[in-house]
Amino acid sequence: MNIKQNDQKFIANTYNRFPVVIKYGKGSLVYDENDHEYIDLSGGIAVNTFGFADQAWIGAITNQLQQVQHTSNLYYTEPAVKLAELLCNKTDMQKVFFSNSGGEANECAIKVARKYAADLKGKDHYTIITLENSFHGRTITTLAATGQADFHQDFTPLTPGFVYARANVFSDIEKLAGQNKCAAIMLEVIQGEGGVNPLNQEYLSQVADFCDKNDLLLITDEVQTGNGRTGKLFGYMNFGLKPDIVTTAKGLGGGLPLGATILGDKVKNTLTPGTHGSTFGGNPVCCAGAINILQRIDEDLLVEVKQKSEYIINTLKNAKGIKNITGLGLMLGIEVERNNQDIIRECIEQGVLVISAKDKVRLLPALNIPQDVLEQAINVIKKTCAKTDNV
């Protein structure tokens, strides 16, 4: 079977895949169909929290598979309740809605924000302010929330009710809130798909204060920044924020599809029976895996994440061919002098899997990547970035 040819023949042509057929993996190492070894610094785009074939995670989901694999949300299941309790206790939030992806988690947040505002202020208060260069999903509504015109083309008309402020320009927030009847402000504390760009502390504090004073909900999209990725359980915790709604996915499931919309005190009772739902949301197997992951994201691991981040930054920040490094924890973007796609291709040829974010090389390794494996991969990146175009 020619996997690459059959992929092109039978799977919708929505991805520009790298020329690697991944067959199996262990930890931060993966192997292709020819058993060639790669060090994975892409993490399934921040999904594989503890790498490939993690035995503790496999044990948790296997145990659950042997009991109940699915019930629908017409019945109670222990894993969903236990996971929701864990998330609430770790965030000081109140309730959780489970779905299957980050896009769905954001859809739920948008619905909650609009219903909350409609109940409190009237149905004309539905506008949500998001940021230019943001990314919130690929459904028609989360696409509308995404502040990047390139993603919008071919899919208009998009869902109305979204306006875009420039990142780190607080006056835009004031202006847009004055021009529209708003329900919420939705943002990523680090714009991942937008180029791994952290927002400024001062700006985030101003936005949070503005939301408090004007009874606007603050929604933080933690789909990529959540679950220990930045050195805190959630990215907003690096900035001292107290959002009303937190969305997450990716690393929460560790490789299984799971999204969560975590609700604070203001909105804990906004959703009522029939106002939202998901057949697969809170799936027992996915939740069992997520419980195992959350229980292992402790302070010791988060300290390791920060130490590994410091190692990467200190090793690369003044290296030849590298202009800048952005991000937090193990969510880093390398601004390079050469074309980033050339560097990514050359790294793959040398056995290191990295991905892009705009014109940067993006690193999203497993949180528990061994130090010696990380050093080997970073050395490859450093040497590759130092090459000139004619080499």
Image: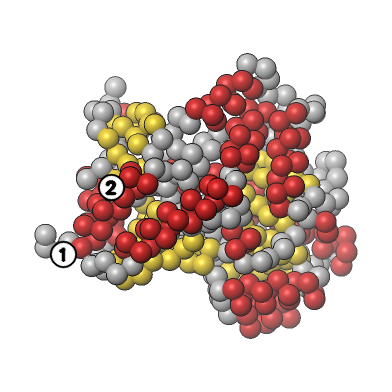
Dividing the picture into quarters, in which one does residue 280 lie? Answer: top right
Quadrant of the rendered image containing residue 43: top left
Quadrant the N terminus occupies: top left
Residue 112, above or below 285:
below
- What amino acid type is highlighted by mark number 2? Gln
Residue beneath the point at 67% across and 45% down: 260
Q: Amino acid at mark 1?
A: Thr
The local secondary structure at tag 1 comes to: loop
- Which mark identifies residue 376? 2
Q: Position of residue 339 (x, y in %)?
A: 26, 63
Callouts 1 and 2 close, C-beta under 8 Å: no
Residue 341, numbered label = none
Residue 365: image location, x then y, percent: 42, 47
Q: Position of residue 98 (x, y in %)?
A: 70, 41
- Say which label, 1 or 2, has the lower sequence index: 2
Height in image: 60 above or below 174? above
Compare residues 71 and 92 and report the one nearer the observer: 92
**Furthest-top residue in view?**
66
Q: Return the residue at label 1.
A: 388
